[in-house]
Amino acid sequence: MKRQSNTTPPSRETLRGVIVPSQWDNEFRVTGMLIACPGEREVRVANLEAFPMLHLLERTEVELTGTVRKDGIAETIHIDRIQSLCE
């Protein structure tokens, strides 16, 4: 019996949402972030180490462009570009 995959092909997208911490180490340093988008969509940042400035933008609205991968209900974005939307 062949196992069916719940993954979809990656797509290039521009997302708008708020950067939210989602994971911490044992010293309470943020080690993971996600983008909280309208409609309760949450997309995890896959390449946080490439964009350390995201830590400075926590809880602010941003526009991100990158490759989004979906595996079941979980989504991740590999970011290429960030634009802060705060004034």
Image (cartoon, helix red, strand yellow):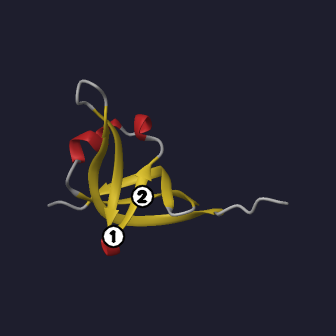
- Report which residue position mark 2 lands on: 43
Q: Label 2, secondary structure: give it.
A: strand
Please state which of residues 15 and 85 is positioned toward the viewer in this rendering: 15
Residue at the image point whose x is 24% and y is 62% from the top? 85
Q: Amino acid at mark 1?
A: Glu
Q: Amino acid at mark 2?
A: Val
Question: How many numbered discs, if any?
Answer: 2
Q: Is residue 49 left or right of residue 54?
A: right
List x then y, in percent, for residue 23. Answer: 33, 40
Q: Label 1, secondary structure: give it.
A: helix
Residue at the image point whose x is 33% and y is 70% from the top? 40
- Report which residue position mark 1 lands on: 40
Residue at the image point whose x is 42% and y is 52% from the top? 44
List x then y, in percent, for residue 19. Answer: 28, 53
Quadrant that contains the N terminus:
bottom right
Relative to 85, say whether 30 is above or below. above
| Residue 37 sits in quarter | bottom left
